[in-house]
């Protein structure tokens, strides 16, 4: 079958703490009010938590209210919003210190999706804060946390009591609830205040308009910036190691797709067009006019510049004999199929003509600025040529690369 994997595709992650922190998903009382009082080791208390909006979307500002008692002048409270690992029945870890991206906290690397905000404490102890949910958000929940830092060294003061705390302990229930932690296990560095529901909505990507590049010119000269980093295809978590990134552009001739694929051991045994590239290591692109699961195209490319393509009338009803008129170029940095050396990886560029897209999908020609397609990009990688890792432009939340409900909206820019 085409690009079918059992997508144990949850990508590898930084090492997790020995005692995972679990938070209750049904702790909300009403109108964004949350129960619980959290007490820090120096006696500071935090409670009466309120949050809006009740359902978050990418880019939303989370308005937080609470009441603090006993905060010394040498201390400061701050709220953070962290991406939980709740997909695929993963636990919630508070992994993310508010430090520069280059720093780590033990073995835990800071996640760029985390965001922090200083709070305002009124004379009556009322707290107001605003924390922004990042645009690169895929998780269906966000963990709201509080930290207390005191003294000239801004040392974190641990939480010693409260309904939920980092390093807390409890039993995960059928509804992702967790019972109170035993008294000796509640102490932690942060107060886990709330698990906020998120409706991320589709990822949005803008393709820049370019003059049609020459076939003899440099590879993807229009590629600028860091591109769009691929994430775990099932859970949306960042991939381990250097990012696999893709770029899109367009001209009157066609849609351009480029990628940077770091790979210490490039591997592909397939040599012929329409070989089943999806059984080994490959980059894949799916394109359609909408998410109706009808009339869509699949393109695959290996580091050996071998291609596979197929046309689908409807969900998984494909024609592998169909051949695209797309053009591809690959730049390899290393040796393919030689496990004895260390490779850097490969880059690629592909051009798909609009005439093809308009004939075999419901994209309407002529296209222009503002035209929208639906798209997803996947990378299949076999570290050690054994285990299987799946990455995606936007996660499908299921081991199904043909899922269009979570595809990205690709808009042609000016």
Image (cartoon, rainbow, N blue to C red):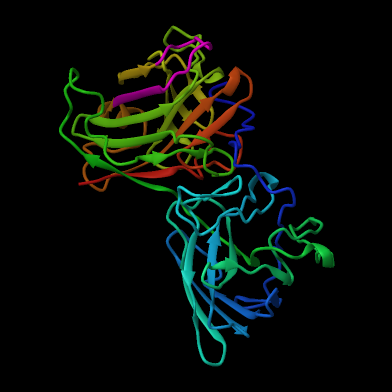
Question: Up-down: is 374 above or below 275?
Answer: below
Looking at the figure, which quarter contains the N terminus? top right
Toward the top, the furthest residue is 271
Q: Residue at x 61, y 39 (%)?
A: 398
Q: Residue at x 42, y 22 (%)?
A: 344
Q: Nearer the viewer, residue 135 or 373?
A: 135
- Residue 110 lies, with reference to residue 161, above or below; the image says above
Q: Which one is nearer the viewer's eye here, 197 or 325?
A: 197
Q: Does the magenta segment cover residue 337?
A: yes
For the record, the magenta segment spans 334-351
Q: Quadrant of residue 234?
A: top right
> How far from the left and from the top, in percent, is residue 326?
31, 21
Q: Is residue 345 magenta?
A: yes
Prevalent SS, magenta region: loop
Left of 126 or right of it: where is 134? left
The total of numbered circles placed on residues is 0
- Residue at (63% x, 24% y) in the render: 387
């Amino acid at each position: 079958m085409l690009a079918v994997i059992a997508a144990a595709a949850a990508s590898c992650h930084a090492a997790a703490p020995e005692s995972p922190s679990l938070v209750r998903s049904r702790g909300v009382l009403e109108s964004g009010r949350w129960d619980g009082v959290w007490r820090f080791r120096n006696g500071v208390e935090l409670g009466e938590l309120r949050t809006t909006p009740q359902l978050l979307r990418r880019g939303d500002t989370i308005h937080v209210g609470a009441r603090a008692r006993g905060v010394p002048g040498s201390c400061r409270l701050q709220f953070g919003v962290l991406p939980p690992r709740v997909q695929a029945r993963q636990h919630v870890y508070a992994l993310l210190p508010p430090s520069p991206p280059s720093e780590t906290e033990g073995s835990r690397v800071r996640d760029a999706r985390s965001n922090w905000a200083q709070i305002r404490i009124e004379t009556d102890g009322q707290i107001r804060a605003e924390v922004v949910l990042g645009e690169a958000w895929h998780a269906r929940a966000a963990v709201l946390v509080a930290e207390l830092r005191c003294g000239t060294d801004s040392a974190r003061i641990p939480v010693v009591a409260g309904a939920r705390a980092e390093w807390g302990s409890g039993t995960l229930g059928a509804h992702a609830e967790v019972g109170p932690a035993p008294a000796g296990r509640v102490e932690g560095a942060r107060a886990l205040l709330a698990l906020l529901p998120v409706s991320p909505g589709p990822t949005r990507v803008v393709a820049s308009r370019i003059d049609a590049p020459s076939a003899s010119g440099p590879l993807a000269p229009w590629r600028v910036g860091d591109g769009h980093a691929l994430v775990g295809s099932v859970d949306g978590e960042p991939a381990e190691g250097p990012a696999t990134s893709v770029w899109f552009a367009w001209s009157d001739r066609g849609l351009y797709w480029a990628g940077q694929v770091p790979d210490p051991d490039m591997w592909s045994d397939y040599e012929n067009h329409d070989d089943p590239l999806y059984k080994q290591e490959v980059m894949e692109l799916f394109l359609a006019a909408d998410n109706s699961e009808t009339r869509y195209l699949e393109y695959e490319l290996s580091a050996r510049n071998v291609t596979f393509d197929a046309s689908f009338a409807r969900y998984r009803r494909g024609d592998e004999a169909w051949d695209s008129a797309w053009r591809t170029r690959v730049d390899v940095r290393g040796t393919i199929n030689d496990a004895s050396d260390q490779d850097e990886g490969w880059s690629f560029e592909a051009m798909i003509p609009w005439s093809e897209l308009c004939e075999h999908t419901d994209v309407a020609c002529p296209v222009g600025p503002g035209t929208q397609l639906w798209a997803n990009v996947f990378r299949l990688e076999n570290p050690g040529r054994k285990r299987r890792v799946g990455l995606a432009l936007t996660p499908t939340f299921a081991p199904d690369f043909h899922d269009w409900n979570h595809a990205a909206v690709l808009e042609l820019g000016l």
